[in-house]
Image: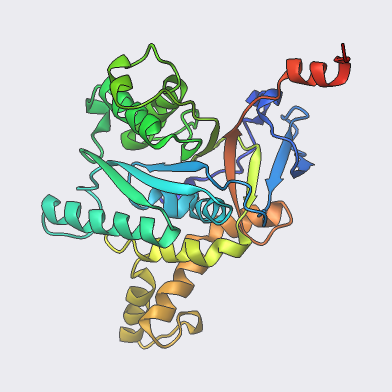
Amino acid sequence: MKRRNFISNNLVLSAMIPASYLSLGFSSQKSEHPFLTQEEVIIEKVAEDKPHKGKVLAVIQPHCDDIPIYAAGTVAKLIYEGYTGYLIRTSNDEAAGAGATSGERFLNNERDNAEVARVLGLKKCYDLNYANHRMDEYNIQEIKGRLIFLFRLLQVDTLICYDPWGIYEENPDHYVTAKAVEAARWMSGMSSDYPEHLEVVKPHTVKEMYYFARGPQIVNRVVDISRFVDIKVASNLVCKTQGPGGDSGSNLRKKLAAEGKKLPLLGDDDKTANFNYTREFVLEQDRINGAKYGLEWAECFHYIGPAPSGLDTYIQKNAVSL
């Protein structure tokens, strides 16, 4: 099953979105899907005033091509807006892509993953190296513990990862990572959980989550990535071991040439072929998402952020001076 084709029309589950999870201050539009409540889909556009300066972003993926496919534009946008970002990869990718042995695939994907971090402007990679496609064999307590430590160590404010509530997800690395991340971000601010950490790190609560899925998903946040699409292309191009970007365009160009054919889109050199192939075909869903919301390119998320405080609002409206 092709990963990009697994994305559905996305809004089917939005009736599950709590109203308190929707942030204020962004332009928005209401969905016309007949099964939805009156929840709004927030359109998040780039902010030029660096509103996230001093904040920390954790970008979490099971495999080195997950973020490039589904969320690299948003990562690039948030880094542009001031975040310091870190990349956490949970599997070792030993079963993915080209390479005669699992060890070769392991090393090749590790290099590709480091390149993804570099292209996206992320400060450091953390590779947890669980066996590829076998993460359901591991005790989730261990995975949670390692993630909690990292969230506390890095003082993570915001994270991007697969949605723990995404449905029809068949890859165990995806759903195990997603569930471990959700549990870890919830527990990382509690001093009663993994108290042995507290000798070296402080409890810290993750405040915002951008969750993506490759199947039907809750969508309440659409991020305009139009200014960052070339960075997203670049992040896919460095995933040479497993694609779907990498050298796919140049390989197709050579295949067609051997058959006496040519696609003008692929140009006359490998660099052009790879870039245009990735932009046109690998990122096709982002163009479709954008068109739905009046944007050129967009990524869709189940966003969970700080819930507005009813008490603070009440105090602001009703408090009087002594």
Q: Is residue 244 shown to the viewer in this render?
A: no
Between 210 and 194, the one nearer to me in the picture = 194
| Residue 299, placed above or below residue 172 | below
Residue located 51% across and 56% down the image: 76
Residue located 12% across and 52% down the image: 103
State how many labels appear.
0
Q: Position of residue 285 (x, y in %)?
A: 55, 55
Q: Residue furthest front?
A: 322
Residue located 49% across and 30% down the image: 206
Q: Quadrant of the rendered structure where residue 297 is?
A: bottom right
| Residue 251, placed above or below residue 97 | below
- Quarter of the rendering occupied by the C terminus: top right
Q: Quadrant of the rendered structure where residue 182 is?
A: top left
* Left or right, 65 with reference to 56: left
Between 203 and 76, the one nearer to me in the picture = 203
Q: Position of residue 274 (x, y in %)?
A: 40, 73
| Residue 48, placed above or below residue 209 | below
Residue located 69% across and 31% down the image: 22
Identify the coloring: rainbow
Q: Position of residue 157 (x, y in %)?
A: 51, 35
Q: Is residue 86 shown to the viewer in this render?
A: yes
